[in-house]
Amino acid sequence: MPKLTIDNLEVTVPEGTNVLEAARALDIVIPHFCYHEALGAVGSCRLCAMKFLDGPVKGLQMACMIKAQDGMVVSSTDADAMDLRQHVIEWAMINHPHDCPVCDEGGECQLQEMTVAGGHGNRRYTGKKCTFTNQNLGPFVQQEMNRCITCYRCVRTYRDYCGGTDYGTFGSRNRIQYGRLQDGALESPFSGNIIDACPTGVLTSKPFRFKTRLWDLQEAPSICPHCSLGCATVPGGRYREVQRVKAGVNRETNGFFICDRGRFGYDHVNHPERPRQPEVDGQTVAMPTALAAARDRVAATVKKHGPNSVAFLGSARASLEANALLRIWAEALGSTQLVFDAHQGRDRAARTLVAQLGTHVRSMEDVRQSDLIVLVGADPLAEGPMLALAMRQAVRKGGKVVVIDPRPVQLPCAASHLVMASERLAEVLTALGRKDSGAFEAQEKDVLSPLLEQIAAAQRPVLIGGADLLGGPGVAALCSAAKELSTEERAVGVMVLLAGPNSYGGALLAGSGPTFDTLLDAIQEGTVRALVCLESDPFCEAMDPARAQAALGHLQLLVSIDATPSLAAQRADIFLPARANAEMAGSYINNEGRLQAFLPVIDPGVPIRETGAGNHPPRSFSLETPGAEPQADWSLLAQLLEREPDLAKVRTAIATEDDRFAALATVDAESTGVRLPAKGVLPPPAERELPQAAAVDALKLLAISAPVGSHWLAHLSAPLAATEPPPTVILHPEMAGALGLVTGDRARLTTHFGHCHVTIRIESQMANGLVLVPQLWDTALEGMVPGSRLDGRLEKEERA
């Protein structure tokens, strides 16, 4: 590790660290624009000049471009370096409009900070400025091109790091402009990252525009609730609403960036239909009354019908603390009817993963460093977008990606694709584990045989699967293949995309308990009379919603704890309003078993923009906050258990009662999290399904997740509404030709849910003979629960 001296202070840094980062380690701020730790150094802004006085490098140099070496003596305060920085800043500011009072970047503007740090304080230029016309870049990003200082960060983030292709650099000299060839929405699902990357007010958040000065925002470290990857975020709130989310930094998970779903999917917290008051039998009551009613009615059911007459359903989006307290409540009553996911396939996949993952677990940072990634039955852009970005970084470093899937999986990087029916994915994994592809056709062997050679030669291979398509058997085959393909010299890693931010934690808590199928059987038979739902909606989340709704109609008591306007919340006999994750402290366990904590940003309450009916400041005042009744999910469970609702005490109690969660007592929201060594238990074996006779003209449908529109919390966010597609089905060209359909045609889809009018999309890189149906909430396709398979018909509609 090189040791150098900067401004008379010695520092030792890891090999490969540049001098700018070395100075940062000493808390010495070197003005810079173009350099970003995730993007690397290009030396384009010429602002980080330092004087190298002694050592292997001498003279004025750009600190970001020079690697730290032993014996270097460097000065950031040398007169020549300071003079150059001052001139560079002055040149960069020549065309800037100096419109700080109306700029959304004010308060966290790197240009303001570096201008002062660079020593430029007086404007001497009086000539004509170069001005630009702004582009409309869609619903997420607002452009103010006149503020640009041509640091190239936006293009390097969008194109180089994120793989976008519709945004770039135009012009030359002092006429350089960044944008698209023409107005239009940015196509990358990571477009919002250019907001964070831009050091000035050129690119800002359009949904957040003119809402709040940044120094008035309440912010805290949090975890994204939209998938299982555990990306670090920093929500910001004011006026009783979450107003924006920016990327947090966690080098083990998301690194420095997040996806657009995580960035703009915050509005479920502010949803106008969000239930905020406790109810008993349809009547609004005080929270203590609702809690007492829930506790007493559940106890009465147990007393009359026995412990197993009450069932408990946890959730992948509830905090670990709440899920653990739910299990404690069930155990206290003597009930074994405890499930943590209403989606049977996702439940089995998560429980199988935590039972068999072991030391093969890999993080997103491991994926970024991998030299071979095999993606089996996983669609990252739909199921965990930041994984796709991690895969891109691996490819940029020379890694390879192989996709085995029935869907047209799109990635922001190069990949080879083997189209394989979903029911054969486990068979492929078994064949890879046995190193035998003899049972496959010639075209399939052409991919599998070289793939086996690539895995054998790779130093850091990772097998990645998705819970929706693989289910329990597929995940078991994935873990088994990784073990069989590993050698003493190197292990094959495993990662599985699960359903939600706490799917892993729920699977750990579930143990060998029943599945939701078993629960539905018990409800239909009358064995289970009451159901407690913790931030879950079994009416819509089960793989067969029709069966679930029919069975749940037999319940005598339904208790719902939720922070969203779910169907379960609407139909509950007793409803207890919970806080959203931005309104409370808690923790999740991500898909690699990493325990991560988050902190509250705001207290719950109806946003002032609603209570004031557009007037601000408000014209009436009260000592009570409207809509402030929601409480943290773990607090509600603690009170139902008649425990003190103190988070520290709750965490200590959970850690004491289950030593697998010992780290919970000391987990820190500012850290990268703690990977738990805990091991789960396999779920009970699945019952064999009876074959169904399909109609002669029936088509095979596979319900899948779409990047936008299929995820409940994201669907409730207004900023994302503009990007939700119309109801669509995806066909192979041969199948579409046989049905007389082309891209853009309207068709009538018929299933046992009823009829739906859909738009046709044709993709050649998918399984023939299969209709892919992305779930879309608030349409006739909302019952298409990802992973479910059903029969249907597709008939072309003649254009009017």
Image (tube, grey):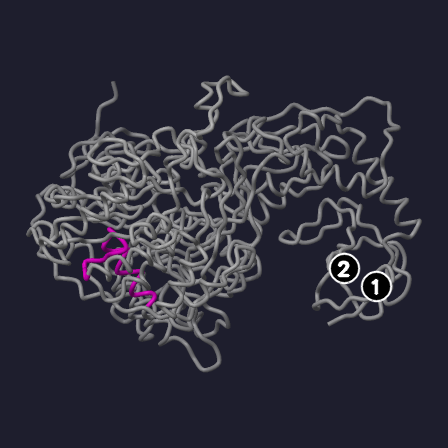
Callout 1 secondary element: strand
Q: Which of the two residues, 251 or 562, is positioned nearer the viewer here?
A: 562
What residue is pinned by disc 1?
9
Residue at left 46%, top 68%?
A: 461
Which image quadrant is residue 738 in? top left
In this view, 3 is above or below 48: below
Asked whether residue 725 appears in the rendered view, the answer is yes
Which residue is situated farthest in the bottom direction here? 488
Q: In this view, does 131 lie above or below 20?
A: above
Q: How crowded is mark 1: few (under 14 residues within 10 Å), some or many (20 or more)?
A: few
- Indicate whether residue 347 is drawn in magenta: yes
Q: Is residue 795 above or below residue 71?
A: above
Is 195 displayed left or right of 432 in the figure? Answer: right
Q: Where does the image place residue 133, in percent across and percent down from the top left?
A: 65, 23
**What residue is disc 2 on?**
26
Q: Position of residue 710 (x, y in %)?
A: 33, 41
Please tell me which of labels 2 and 1 falls first in the chain. Answer: 1
Q: Residue at x 41, y 29 (%)?
A: 626
Q: In this image, 89 relative to 709: left or right?
A: right
Q: Position of residue 564 (x, y in %)?
A: 34, 38
Horizontal side, residue 57 vs residue 164: left or right: right
Q: Looking at the figure, which quarter contains the C terminus?
A: top left
What span is colored magenta in the figure? Answer: 334-354
Badge 2 density bin: few <14, some 14–19, many ≥20, Cα 10 Å? few
Q: Which residue lies furthest to the right in this view?
A: 79
